Amino acid sequence: MKIVRRQGQNRSSWKWSLARTRLVFPVLVGVALVLDGLVVAVPAGADPDVLNPVAGNDTSGVPTSGQLGSGQSIGYPNDLAVDAQGNVYFADIYDYQIDVVNASTGLLTVLAGTGTEGIPTSGEPAAGQAIGDPYALTVDSQGNIYFVDDTNDTIDEISAPTINGLGVVTSGGELTVLATSSQGVDLPFDIAVDSSGNVFFANGNYSIAEISHATGLTTFVAGTGSEGTPTTGSSGYSQSIGNPFHLAVDSLGNLYFGDTTNDEVDELSAPVLNNSGDITGGDVLNVLAGSGSEGTPTTGVSGVGQSIGQPLSVTVDSSGKVYFVDGNNFEVDELSAGSYTDGVLTGGDVLNILAGDGFVFVVTSGEVGFGQSAGEPLSVAVDSLGNVYFSDGYDDEVDQLSTGSYTDGVLTGGDVLTILAESGYPQDTRVGDNHPPAVTNLAVTGSGLLYVADELNDDNTHYVESFPLTAPPVPIAFDTVTYSAGAGTGTVPTQDPVVDLGTFTVASGGSLSNPGYSFAGWSDGTTTYQPGATYTVGSAPVTLTAVWKAVSLVPVTYANGGGTGTLPTQGAVQAGTTITVASGAGLSDPGYTFAGWSDGTTTYQPGDAYTVGGSPVTFTAQWKSSSSSSSGSSTSHLSDTVYFALGSSKLTPGDLASLKTFAVKVKNANVTALTVTGYADSTGTEPNNHSLSIQRARSVAAELTKLGLTSVTVHVLGGGVSHTYANAALDRRATITS
């Protein structure tokens, strides 16, 4: 079976050519599987022959919120995901709905869709409004749901819903359209999300795009929109690829996919995007297995450069091992984690055939998978212990392969194949309910449940089902938990070792300090946790490092404005702090009297209260002539300061407003001459800085002339480099004095 989109192939035929091989694996907290249109689940240790519907019955129909999922009709559950609480989400492509079945109550809630096709409105609750065809979905660690709308060519998000005991969404559940066809969405058919909330989706036009969680911008990270064969070690976004089938993301944000056109399994190193959506790092495409043409792989050697068959399903475990179904050679294969330098493989990436001998035949339970037939494998999943699960379309069963161990590419233990569920059991006690199971999705969790999307081919009924896994006893393992002060000092908390997959409460950071910084939580390298949060360990040691956030300090300084003497000092303060304006008693200017301090907009008197905003503040002394003119008016000694961006002499709108106010003061004070002196900080060369200082002075002088000071003589001076202030931003200025 070759999964390739032909030129001009319509949306419907392309979509259904994919449906039988769909397999997406969510957070590893259980095992989930969708068979014969049912959704099912059974606790660990229960009778392995018993299959329990979670949603669906013997008729196809539109489900109702607030009722038990088991026993009521659903449409076609084409894709499913399981969150950390064991709640099961599935995409119903017959009813155009996204549904969830609560792990505790069994109640089904329709999160999005009305049973008929439509175009949703972004920013509104998802429940109650129509959507298009939700062909694939996934859920992140926060409970947000992401899905592809195949009809409307959109990528949509449903914010994590809070559901009460009646199965009603009470908060959250808002639908946001993340990307549309105008952002390049074109026949989307798979989706994945990394631990940072970045969303990846596969297009039918030979491309993969990422939606940044930080900016919301869509960036194409692999493929050009035309079919081609990629080059390993080169940037993904600048070269053509084939059909990107089945997306998987590891804990580091690296993306894996099967290229069904070129018969390859590819890795895309985690793209680094700036705030404009440009790729500034990562995004290197490495061909892990395949040569660009179909062939039969050899076990125990590198996957790079050797031919494989068509990869129908791809997933990755927590250690970086990649598993895939070889649809042409009827195999389940593993690729050990690879290491690369400048796009060149330097180690790892060994291909091991876990099950399959190239022939379609009946499998034997209890024997090693390598060397025997795997039937017709269609989809693959892996749990946190390294056990592998796959659906066998020939034998109508779901099989498990225990974790294998290898020495120099040779199997030395494990890899035992066990049939978990198969056709032939009594009614309601087996996968497929006496019908061949069309497994469209498997999802593995740590709670001992296997969820199956199950299609009954002969009577067109569908279920989501679950049944228990029977696994060999696993020794209890404990993981160390260590706290680190990071850049701070003080006594760090302690934590006793925690059992694998166990939880503990994150400690307080109250005894730590870091001058100029505030404690912002504990990071495990991926996520920041606050004191009191519940942390679930995996199967490796955990180090929580203190995160420090710089306290926002705003410099406050005083300038003499042409006078002499000792200036007041004021240290930097946090934005929003109210300070008392200082006295000017230490300053003098012959012929003038101190008249207050100006921040460039308003003149303040000593003792006034001043609230500091988010920008640096300079108070410039204001001077008033000690003698009056014959008309009784007086001449003030005026000054002002304009600050510039690094390397710029351009005036901002705020500068223009400030100069306009200053020009009015000059006219009212009968000033006849002004001196404008420009300065630069120490960045760059001395000649350039001197030229820049003159340009800044001229910019200010030109604006003053525009403001009507044509009768005032303006002297322009270049002060060159200024070392007046510790904060270089205050040296990038032009001063005006009368």
Image (tube, rainbow, N blue to C red):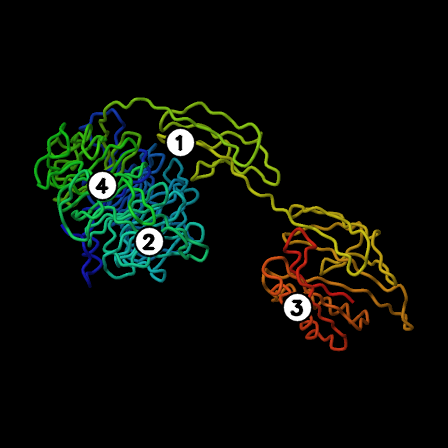
Q: Are marks 1 and 3 in contact (CB under 8 Å)?
A: no
Front-most of residues 455 and 488: 488
Q: Amino acid at mark 2?
A: Ala
Q: CA distance from mark 3 to mark 4?
A: 73 Å
Q: Which residue is mark 4?
A: 453
Label for residue 694?
A: 3
Which label lies toward us, 4 or 2? 4
Q: Which residue is mark 2?
A: 130
* Quadrant in which the C terminus is drawn: bottom right
Residue 110 found in image quarter: top left
Q: CA distance from mark 4 to mark 2?
A: 23 Å
Q: Secondary structure at mark 4?
A: strand
Q: Describe residue 616's horizontal placement relative to residue 228 as left or right.
A: right
Q: Amino acid at mark 4?
A: Ala
Q: Secondary structure at mark 1?
A: strand
Tell me where residue 507 appears, x and y as whole percent: 50, 29
Residue 690 found in image quarter: bottom right
Q: Secondary structure at mark 3?
A: helix
Seen at 17% across and 32% down, the residue is 421
